[in-house]
Amino acid sequence: MATVAQWIEGARIRTFPNAIAPVLAGTGAAAGIDRFDPVVAVLALAVALLLILGVNFANDYSDGIRGTDTDRVGPFRLVGSGAARPAAVRGAAFGCFGLAALAGIGVVVLSGQWWMLAVGALCIAGAWFYTGGSKPYGYAGLGEIAVFLFFGLIAVLGTQYVQAGTVSGFGIGSAVAVGSFSSAVLVANNLRDIPTDRTTGKRTLAVLLGDRDTRTLYVMLALVPFLITTLMGLRNTWMLLAFLALPLLITSLRNILSGAKGRRLIPALRDTGFAMLAWSVITALALAFGQS
């Protein structure tokens, strides 16, 4: 039976910036047009956190029963290590999805945007079928696209929409930036796992592209947010403060470009997540208080 500490480690708390950042950015975009709703924002954050917990446990379960976590370089996995029964981890995933659905219903009731129920159902399905089911799309090179969609466009614009009833140009720019950051986190993760994923038949985008092109993709995705910062800064000069997040990526970019492999790539996931979170905090404040 897994210990509490192992369950916490299996929850992969370091991925939480992927859930927190889009809600911050979307809330900042809503506040920028004077439509901030603190209750809806908190519920949206609960949805995002519960979904990422659910997808982490779901991935742990699905990868574990397929045997793709048997020889793992990355973080601890509950099923792959044998610390927890697969049924228990699957139950934890479904429990998180259920709680996310309840929080999402609260968002829908308060906002009156009932059609968002379908979006929520799509998000839960996307979380499960990333590595679950007979043909997981995460094993077909589509993981980065899904992350960009769910933790970028849908999460940021959905957060703004349920508070403001509309989306703005700043919201769209923020959604693309956060989606790029989130995708970069996954690219770094899959770059690290190319050798083991190739052996186990897990055809991630990194496996399909190969080592060199995957490194190029990471650099491009990590720098896209700062191009967007520059463009949004033309209308809101406070946005340029988001460049303060760039130094957090220096070590990751250096390691990626120098050909680091295996465990040397693990810090890139953490640092990219922290850069995304810092960028989103600064951007949210700039959008909330700096728009003219």
Image (tube, rainbow, N blue to C red):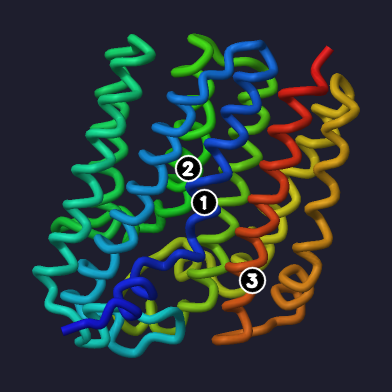
Disc nearer the start of the sequence (2/1):
1
Q: Residue at x 65, y 59 (%)?
A: 274
Using a 10 Å C-alpha cutoff, classify the residue at mark 3 as few (fewer than 14 neighbours), some (14 to 19) or many (20 or more). Answer: many
| Distance (Cα) linking label 2 and label 1 | 7 Å
Outermost residue on the left side: it is 87
Q: Quadrant of residue 230?
A: top right
| Distance (Cα) linking label 3 and label 1 | 14 Å
Outermost residue on the bottom side: it is 71
Disc nearer the start of the sequence (3/1):
1
Q: Which residue is mark 3?
A: 268
In the rendered structure, are the residues bearing label 2 and label 1 in contact, judged by CB atoms less than 8 Å apart? yes
Q: Nearer the viewer, residue 252 or 98?
A: 98
Q: Amino acid at mark 3?
A: Ala
19 vs 223, left or right, is left
273 vs 110, left or right, is right
- Residue 142: percent from the left, percent from the top? 40, 52
Q: Residue at x 46, y 46 (%)?
A: 145
- Residue 30: percent from the left, percent from the top? 60, 19
- Residue 236: percent from the left, percent from the top? 85, 23
Q: Quadrant of residue 146?
A: top left
Using a 10 Å C-alpha cutoff, classify the residue at mark 1 as few (fewer than 14 neighbours), some (14 to 19) or many (20 or more). Answer: many
175 vs 94, left or right, is right
